[in-house]
Image: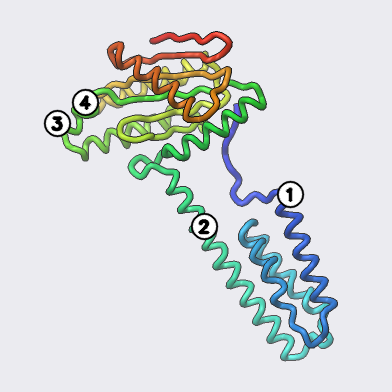
Amino acid sequence: MVSTTKQPNRPTVAAVITMCALVAVAVSFDVLAPVSYDPGLLYLPVILVVAWRFRIPVALGLLLLVTPIRLIGAANPLASEFIWSVCSWLGVYFLVVLLTVLLRRSVERERQLARTDTLTGLANRTALLERIEAELNRGRRKGSPLSVAYIDCDHFKQINDQHGHAVGDRVLEQTATAMKKSTRNYDLVARTGGDEFVIVLPETAAEETRIVIGRIQDDLSQLMRDNNWDVSFSIGAVTFVEFPSSAADAVHAADELMYAVKQAGKNGVGYSVVGAETLTSTG
């Protein structure tokens, strides 16, 4: 199994090396610069990189490190002019850290919103294709299977027509919530639009896919019964042992299998294994 929990702002080796190099350059200029020259500006690139790439404690720790470094290169560290200069620059650095962190959080929030379905809070199609592409690359490297399930809500149009779009939205929201509860924490549930959903099951072989999808189908059916909603689900679940060339092809394969289930009478699951020999079954 694979966990996709992401560590926020986790520094890479390249980022650490870049930070150390910038610090070394700034310190060298600070210590070797003429007494009349104020090298405070040299630390700004370092502060910017650290505040953007690392956690806040690292950036604040660097601010504390700057003060003794400035004192080392000072001819008269107790002079009021020098103390005022250092304090002023520390204030500027702190403001830069604050603004940079706020900007980064805003960018991350916008990036997340661009990959999130506004109604259900699930991943949208953009995030879905990105994740499948990553899992396909993982599968090619490790030789592990990938399963993709396409789910369509049967008779959903009648819900909107008979009860209104507010009820229809509630059906979609609760369906999304039920899918999230029924899947594992490393799976991805996405809404591709309308009443259609896709579930990505990383490193999941055909037999386990049947168990997971069967549980999802049971939970969704129970949810519809509890709310007296005349909705069922047609599901196409494809397990890839041999991988398609793109994420879009993987989604298309599951979509076609789901459509075959609908054509056969709806309210069912079709399973397919794409490998040396492609096997398809319905249940």
Of the residues shown, which amino acid type is indicated by label 3?
Gln
Mark 1: give few (<14), some (14-19) or many (20+) Cα within 10 Å. few
- Circle 2 SS class: helix
Residue at position x 48%, y 26% from top?
A: 249
Determine whether the residue tagged by mark 3 lies in a helix, strand or loop.
Answer: helix
**Which amino acid does the dot numbered 1 rest on?**
Val
Depicted 75 relative to depicted 47: above or below: below
Q: Specify the amino acid type for callout 2.
A: Arg
Per the image, the residue denoted by label 2 is: 105
- Whether residue 96 is situated above or below residue 37 in the rendered picture: above
- In the image, residue 66 lies at what x, y percent? 74, 72
Specify whether residue 280 is in view.
Answer: yes
Q: Which residue is mark 4?
A: 228
Q: Residue at x 50, y 56 (%)?
A: 107
How far apart marks 4 and 2 lie (CA) works out to: 42 Å
Q: Which mark is residue 25?
A: none
Q: CA distance from mark 4 to mark 3?
A: 13 Å
Helix, strand or loop at label 1? It is helix
- Mark positioned earlier in the residue sequence (4 or 1): 1
Disc nearer the start of the sequence (1/3): 1
Would you name the residue on which mark 3 appears?
Answer: 162
Question: Label 2 neighbourhood size at 10 Å, few (<14), some (14-19), many (20+)?
Answer: few
Observer able to see residue 225: no
* Residue nearer the viewer, 185 or 158: 158
Q: Which residue is mark 1?
A: 13
The reply to whether the C-beta atoms of the residues labelled 2 and 1 are less than 8 Å apart is no
In the visual, does 276 lie left or right of 248?
right
Q: Nearer the viewer, mark 4 or mark 1?
A: 1
- Direction front: furthest residue: 245
